[in-house]
Image (cartoon, rainbow, N blue to C red):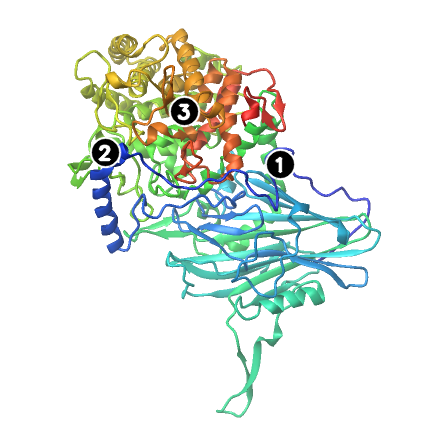
Amino acid sequence: MEIETAGDHEDIDEPSRYGLKLLLNHEFPLKSKQLIIPRPKQIFEMMPLSARYLKYYLAKRMQKRKPIMDYVNMISAQRMYGCPIGGIGGGTIGRGFKGEFCRFQLYPGLYEYVTVPECQFIINIRDAKKDTIFQSVLSTYNKPKKAPQTWEWNLNGSDCEYTALYPRAWTTYDLTKYGIKLVCRQITPVIPHNYKDSSLPCAVFVFSAKNVCNEHRDVSISFTWTEVLGEPNKKKNIGKLDLERYAEEHTCGVTLEQKIADQPCTFTIAKKKQESETIHDAYCLWNSAKTSRYVWECLKKHGKLEPDHNQSAKVMDNKNGKEKAKKIYKNDSIALSSTISLDPGGCGSAEFCLVWDMPIIKYKDSKIHKRYYTKYFGSDGIAGPSIAAYALKNYENWEKQLSEWQDPILNNSNIPDWLKSALMNELYFIADGGTIWFDVSDEYPETDPRHEFGVFGYLEGHEYRMYNTYDVHFYASFALAQLWPNLQVVLQYMYRDSIALESPKLRQSLYDGKSCKFKVKDTVPHDLGDPDGLPFTQINAYNIHDVSEWRDLNLKFILQVMRDYRLLRAYSAPFGNERSSEVVEECGEKVETREPAVAVWDSRQYLADLYPACAALLRRGLEWDKDGDGLIENGGFPDQTYDAWVMTGPSAYCGGLWVAAISVVHQMARILKLEDDEREFAKLLEQARSSLENKLWNGSFYRFDTKPSNRDVVMADQLAGHWFLRASGWTDQVFPEENVKKALNTIYENNVMRFLNGRMGAVNGFVRGARGHVDTTALQSEEVWTGVTYGLAAVMIYEGMHEQAFVTAGGLHNTLMKMGLAFETPEALYENGNHRSVAYMRPLAIWSMYQAILARPCPPAPVNNGQPHLANESNL
């Protein structure tokens, strides 16, 4: 494909001003690895649990299955990733910032940490005499030993820069030595409120070239693809491999079929073409082990790909004495090239698309599950060309939609630059979190949101393989609720249906060895299953504790319902009309919609449908109020999201969630005009509030719990309940305003500034005093949880403490970037720089900061080199 260009064209596309920016030879200054070293006391306490876990682990290995959490083979961060590609629920492919295709997650929830060197972009530059003056793979990572030997890695990393602003990325290549400047735009259609396009398993790559010399240049970009590994043992597939060439009205391409985890998957690479061009002009089928040299030499000689006609040899047919062609090699790879013809000063582009079509997922129950995108493109496994053509036709509109969403955030002077980048880039987990999204329109009536929007699940983390882990989703849900609210609604209905379930089946709890039911009635399950089992059917895969006794799960469901209700009303009712006024009456706060109304599930129906479950969950929680004072007690074991940190008696974390949940259900009853329930919960709320203040408020903060040895422990997450009330529009003081402010100042002084001078966010537990120190009672008390720090920062913003919020969250984000942990953000960091559980759900809580900023704008944040101006900045 040759595109003639003149010198008066627009300049090449420049990357975003914002985002993660790295030279392609960048080395991260801070080291970080996953190495958990418990203290001697912690080891002693964990020994029984460790013994039972080891027994469970060995049993799984004997069954040739993976444990849901593998503490024997933990994965350290790879410190190499950029924006992954692929929409929501169709599988994802990771990309390194140096150009790698890596971290394949094509079968839902199962990851392969492998880089495939044959999956590449290759550039060829020819001069006016049609002689090749430069050719290189467009990657700067070290050439792997198994890479094609003749392929050359000739880029200078210091001349190239990567910019990531999810779901887009830019790579600029300064090739002025050869007369060319080149920019690659990577676009994935993960677009808020656009459910069709966001589900597509594809990405578009647009290469824009500019001739900066005074001679003609031909720039050829080639896209190569091969079999990707599809089994955990890292052996090549023996499955069916088909190759097909196709051409549609404005596109042409090549497809390759293989099997991944016994599921057919078809890869398609395609490009935009001129009217006169055919697929035969610039494609190649090749063998990754035998004919990669041909690909390289063909480009060097011709400046584009041509079919290899030498792969067949003439042999004699003994039956009729005639010659026939016989293939020497089996082709297992595909490639396409586009050539941009540039006069001096001219600009041009080449547009490619990659699609992977794996429409059907079959679990062990043999039921056919259709991915959500099949609703629009069919489930027969031949949708790759159609999706590619659709993507190449619509990607400019995708970019327009992304700009319309991102620009108001990027141009908001109330948001520091680092936060603008972090907000976008943390969204990678919505698609790359092992996400599954199935079309179930034939299983639910139109009165159920799943009829239109399917069922949805994402993992707790890449290493913690459980879908929709609810205690963690509580933090992460702000991203879905604001950007894809109908998926949040779907998830809530899925949990609503699980609450009334009871299972007589028993299993052993690894924590104490006792037998417990898989599921107890009127409880929220911990998760909706394991991708290696039967997700959404076999729920509560988590087996460390009896989660029916967890104090936080029920309360977190209730709090999310009200937060969602408020957001749904804001989206469906632009500020100033009658429905917005109703929000003022119900929540005590004016809700201003900052964007046009979007199509969301009816908020009133949502509240009415979920209220019975909320009331049942709250009443069930009264069983944990042993002394009848209106405040629940913890059970003396890790019975909440901090599942290695014991709370005994009334606690700030669970007690605060409890009081907030009562306030929410009371408000729901008032909205729905259920007068008896309203009176019941009004009385309970008054009693619970009084008990919380009397038992846990000490004048400076809410006590961790009532155990004497914990009297000086300051918990970073003690205001989680208040956080959700503020996010739900509460202005009345369920928690006294003066106490909230004092608690936040105490947390900031101790958990933030006395811990590494604010460089790493808020440590979970800090023992206050003249010789204050990190609480080492439990492994998790001395961790920094990324998502908790972002949630804490949101509370600070709601209370007008913007500077402290940006110091708290900005210090953590700055450290994460120096460690190279982008696009694999861990659950936890340690004081020594190590991390735990890479690529985790909870950091999506950063979107609660954005919601808080909209509710409580602040003066423009002073910046310094793209980072917030922090107290103790020199220590960062």
3 or 2: tag closer to the N-terminus: 2
Q: Are marks 2 and 1 in contact (CB under 8 Å)?
A: no
Quadrant of image for the C terminus: top right
Specify few, some or many for label 3: CA neighbours under 10 Å numbering under 14, 14-19, or 20 or more: many
Amino acid marked by disc 3: Asp
Q: Position of residue 649 (x, y in %)?
A: 22, 19
Q: Amino acid at mark 1?
A: Lys
What secondary structure is marked by label 3? Answer: helix
The label number, if any, that marks residue 400 in the structure image: 1
Determine whether label 3 and label 2 are within 8 Å by CB.
Answer: no
Res 592 seen here: no
Mark 3 or mark 2, whichever is nearer to me: 2
- Which of the two labelled residues, at mark 3 and mark 1, occupies the earlier sequence position? 1
The one nearer the camera, 24 or 873, is 873
Measured as percent of width and height from the top left, residue 419 is found at 55, 28
- The residue carrying mark 3 is 564
Residue shown at 28% from the left, 55% from the top = 64
Mark 1 secondary-structure assignment = helix
Label 2 crowding class (10 Å Cα cut-off): few <14, some 14-19, many 20+? Answer: few
Amino acid type, residue under disc 2 in the picture: Glu
For residue 45, which numbered disc appears in the image? 2
Query: As drawn, is 115 to the left or to the right of 547?
Result: right
Q: Is residue 329 above or below residue 430?
A: below
**Image quarter of residue 668:** top left
Bin the neighbour count of mark 1 within 10 Å (Cα to Cα): few under 14, some 14-19, many 20 and up: few
User: Helix, strand or loop at disc 2?
Assistant: helix
Which of discs 2 and 1 lies nearer the camera? The answer is 2
Relative to 82, does residue 127 appear above or below in the rendering?
below
- N-terminal of the two: label 2 or label 1? 2
* Residue at the front extreme, as displayed: 771
CA distance separating discs 3 and 1: 27 Å
Q: Does any portion of residue 825 appear in the rendered image? A: yes
